[in-house]
Amino acid sequence: MRIDVNAVSRWIDDEGGVTSIEYALIGMLIAVVIVSAVSALGTKMHDLYQTVASQIIAAVH
């Protein structure tokens, strides 16, 4: 079996896989930030709607 030194050298120098992994990690980080923000906002909106609903019910009665 003959090993092509140029092919091995190109394979070692290839950073395409590393770049795609970095992009995947950045994408996952952005997704985590978005999910966290939406979750926190959703909780605050729920509390706001509950407050408004209780005030409306109190005003009607």
Image: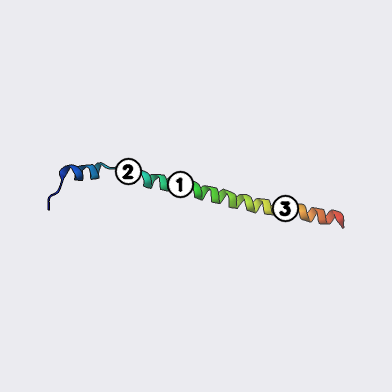
Residue 38 rendering spot, x and y as whole percentages:
59, 50
Displayed quadrant of residue 7: top left
Alpha carbon distance from label 2 to label 1 = 17 Å
Q: Residues within 10 Å of mark 2 (few under 14, many from 20)?
A: few
Q: Residue furthest left?
A: 1
Residue 9 falls left or right of residue 44: left
Pointer 2 with pointer 1, Cβ within 8 A = no
Residue 10 falls left or right of residue 30: left
Q: Which residue is mark 3?
A: 49
Q: Earlier in the sequence, mark 2 or mark 3?
A: 2
Say which of marks 1 and 3 sits in front. 1
| Front-most of residues 6 and 12 | 6
Pointer 2 with pointer 3, Cβ within 8 A = no
Residue 22 falls left or right of residue 53: left
Q: Which mark is residue 61?
A: none
| Front-most of residues 20 and 54 | 20
SS at mark 1 in the image: helix
Name the kind of residue labelled 2 in the image: Gly
Q: Earlier in the sequence, mark 1 or mark 3?
A: 1
Name the kind of residue labelled 1 in the image: Gly
Residue 44 rendering spot, x and y as whole percentages:
66, 51
SS at mark 3 in the image: helix
Name the kind of residue labelled 3 in the image: Tyr
Residue 8 falls left or right of residue 22: left
Residue 22 rendering spot, x and y as whole percentages:
38, 45
Q: Which residue is mark 2?
A: 16
Q: Which mark is residue 27?
A: 1
* Residue at image location 71% in from the left, 51% down from the top: 48
Q: Residues within 10 Å of mark 3 (few under 14, many from 20)?
A: few
| Front-most of residues 12 and 57 | 12
Say which of marks 2 and 1 sits in front. 2
